[in-house]
């Protein structure tokens, strides 16, 4: 009886292994016949090693400022911004900030968040971006529902245009006191040799004037200024901006360090590749975490 039982157990074990082997072969055949699973995105650390949203969230929770660099028409970036805001709000006091709102729209934004005006009122007063409804309204409405402050951090476009046209920050000296309260304090430190600023001139070709780079710098400086001005001890300030404003720890990061070098700043960037694995060498070092999205991903506008 003992021997018979042992044989049955051995046969049962062999049967299980045969089934597992068959499943493995079928999986391999399926993968070969129909292609590998398609990943919409992958997350990497700054050195290009595979990472995860969980690790990104852990770092974000320990940061003072999180700069989420997006591609403005990328739905994965917008979705992850909202998810990150939701998850941070569960464990941290959260403040939001956005390049997409100019500083002189702060009152309109505050009125919307408090319920004093509706979406139509915000649209008429705040010069909303064309893709606001699809890409940024979910984040702002989440803040409204949970009484989270949202800071309009960008310089009013007309002031950046003045710098672009004149090629000098000195043109801003003529602004009145109220207008100057909407920009970074003058004089603004400026290093035209920062690699990203040099690259901007090269990419723009004959249009890459010093004024264009200075206009970018005054945007970066103003966003950094309002982040520092509105950050509170113990809170996480999650800021949404175009990736170019914080890539390679330049732009906004440069001005944050000029203003308050003690802030623990985490950067996130969004890139696109034909295949999300592995991360291409040109993207390494772009940020502390890099979200790589399949370039065939649908665009929001």
Image (tube, rainbow, N blue to C red):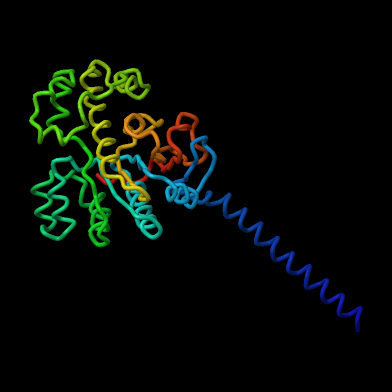
- In the image, residue 204 above or below residue 136: above
Whole-percent x and y of residue 52?
50, 49
| Residue at the extreme top of the image, as rendered | 206
Q: Left or right? Give the position of 30 relative to 140.
A: right
Count of numbered marks: 0
Residue at image position (27%, 21%) is 204
Rendered view: 285 above or below 168: below
Q: Residue 4 lies in what quarter of the image?
A: bottom right
Residue at (47% x, 32% y) in the render: 285
Residue 22, image x and y in percent? 68, 61
Q: Quadrant of the C terminus?
A: top left
The x, y position of residue 203, in whole percent, is: 31, 22
Residue 181, image x, y percentages: 15, 36
Q: Residue at x 69, y 63 (%)?
A: 20
Point 24% across, 53% down: residue: 140
Decide: is 58 above or below 253. below
Quadrant into which the N terminus falls:
bottom right
- Decide which of 205, 95 is in the foreground and name it: 95
């Amino acid at each position: 009886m003992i021997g018979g039982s042992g044989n049955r157990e051995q046969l049962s074990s062999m049967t299980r292994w045969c089934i597992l082997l068959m499943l493995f072969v079928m999986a391999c055949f399926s993968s070969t016949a129909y292609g590998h699973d398609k990943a919409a995105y992958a997350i990497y650390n700054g050195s290009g090693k595979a990472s995860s949203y969980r690790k990104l969230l852990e770092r974000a929770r320990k940061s003072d400022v999180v700069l989420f660099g997006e591609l403005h028409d990328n739905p994965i970036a917008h979705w992850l911004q909202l998810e990150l805001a939701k998850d941070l709000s569960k464990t941290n006091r959260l403040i939001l900030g956005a390049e997409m709102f100019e500083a002189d729209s702060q009152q309109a934004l505050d009125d919307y968040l408090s319920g004093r005006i509706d979406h139509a009122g915000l649209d008429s007063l705040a010069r909303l971006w064309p893709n606001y409804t699809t890409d940024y309204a979910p984040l702002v409405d989440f803040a409204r529902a949970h009484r989270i402050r949202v800071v309009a951090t960008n310089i009013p476009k007309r002031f950046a245009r003045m710098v672009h046209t004149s090629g000098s920050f000195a043109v801003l000296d003529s602004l009145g006191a109220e207008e100057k309260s909407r920009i970074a304090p003058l004089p603004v430190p400026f290093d035209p040799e920062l690699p990203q600023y040099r690259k901007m001139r090269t990419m723009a070709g004959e249009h890459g004037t010093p004024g264009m780079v200075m206009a970018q710098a005054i945007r970066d400086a103003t966003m950094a200024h309002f982040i520092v001005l509105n950050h509170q001890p113990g809170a996480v300030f999650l800021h949404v901006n175009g990736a170019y404003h914080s890539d390679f720890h330049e732009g906004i990061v440069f001005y944050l360090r000029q203003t308050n070098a003690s802030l623990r700043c985490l950067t996130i960037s969004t890139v696109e590749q034909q295949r999300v694995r592995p991360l291409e060498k040109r993207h390494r070092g772009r940020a502390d975490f890099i979200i790589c999205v399949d370039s065939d991903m649908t665009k929001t506008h």
